[in-house]
Amino acid sequence: MSMLGIPVGTGGSSALAVALQAAYLAGPLLRERFLGPKEVTEKSRGNLVTDVDLLVEQQVLALLRAEFPAFRILSEESPAVESDSDYIWIVDPLDGTRNYASGVPHFAFNIALAKAEDVLLGLTYDPVREELFLAIKGRGATLNGRPLSVSRHTDILQCLLGFDMGYSDERARKALQLIQGLWPGMQSIRVLGSAALGLAYAAAGRLDLYFHHNIYPWDITPGLLLVREAGGQVVDRQGRPARVQTDGVIASSHLLLERFLQVTEGSPWRQM
């Protein structure tokens, strides 16, 4: 165990060092293939996977298995790796695949290590902008080494809100209804196409508030820790602390989140 309370792998590297190695392995692959030809497959309506997702995942999982052979692994494109260990790696080789496949430079690599439901470290890497968002439990959150802090805005009418809708038509309709109920009145709204970057931007204060639904652990686990270590909160649609298995999240500062929950009380999106 390292001084940070982070496990050490078979080669002597800490889990933090291995997560960074995974990010810097994934980043060049994602960049190099971004504007080139790709094989794109539709897993379900609107839910894509490319050959680059699979290539990145294959190489990252090989690294994790070599360094931490006893740990469980949950990754978007592969069957879960099970064991008796309490530790689990959670990986999304390419969050924002629709953006990536369409030539929109807004996507990220996601990796987190949790012990049961306790997230120990989370990393979101944007290889286009070379921005590495990193959080270690109890040690804060950083962007390329600089400390992060959530937005200080407290007036919902002045906030920049980000959201995403997922692949469910019904849930998307309810999310748009929620937005319609807030607009006009909000300063501005953005649809991002990447939950990983949405949560990272909330942690960095670039977005005052971010919400999403119909999501999976690999989409949000690094972001849960990023936002909390940056001084913010992440809750589910009912306002309870979000967990790794939460299927919907709202992330912001304490005061703005409280206000958002008040003004959206009774919204169908909150009650799904």
Image (tube, helix red, strand yellow):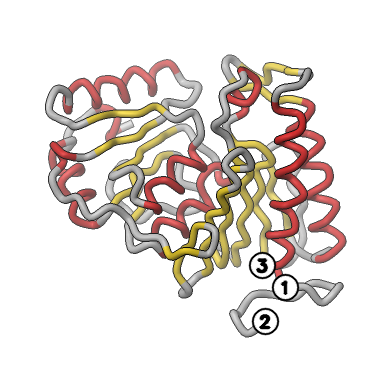
The kind of residue on which mark 2 rests is: Ser
Task: Give me the disc on residue 16.
Answer: 3
Indicate left or right for 77 with 193 as reference.
Answer: right
The secondary structure type at the circle numbered 2 is loop
What residue is drawn where x is 56% and y is 58%? 122
Question: Mark 3 near mark 2, Cβ–Cβ under 8 Å?
Answer: yes
Task: Give the side of residue 142 with respect to residue 158, left or right.
Answer: right
Q: Is residue 231 left or right of residue 100?
A: left
Residue lying at 79% horizontally and 72% vertically, measured from the top left: 9
Label 1 CA crowd tier, 10 Å (few <14, some 14–19, many 20+):
many
Mark on residue 14? 1
Quadrant (top left/top right/bottom left/bottom right) for the N terminus? bottom right
Q: How many marks?
A: 3
Task: Report if the CB atoms under discs 3 and 1 are less than 8 Å apart.
Answer: yes
Tell me the distance, in whole angstroms, between the alpha carbons under discs 3 and 2: 9 Å
For label 3, the SS is: helix
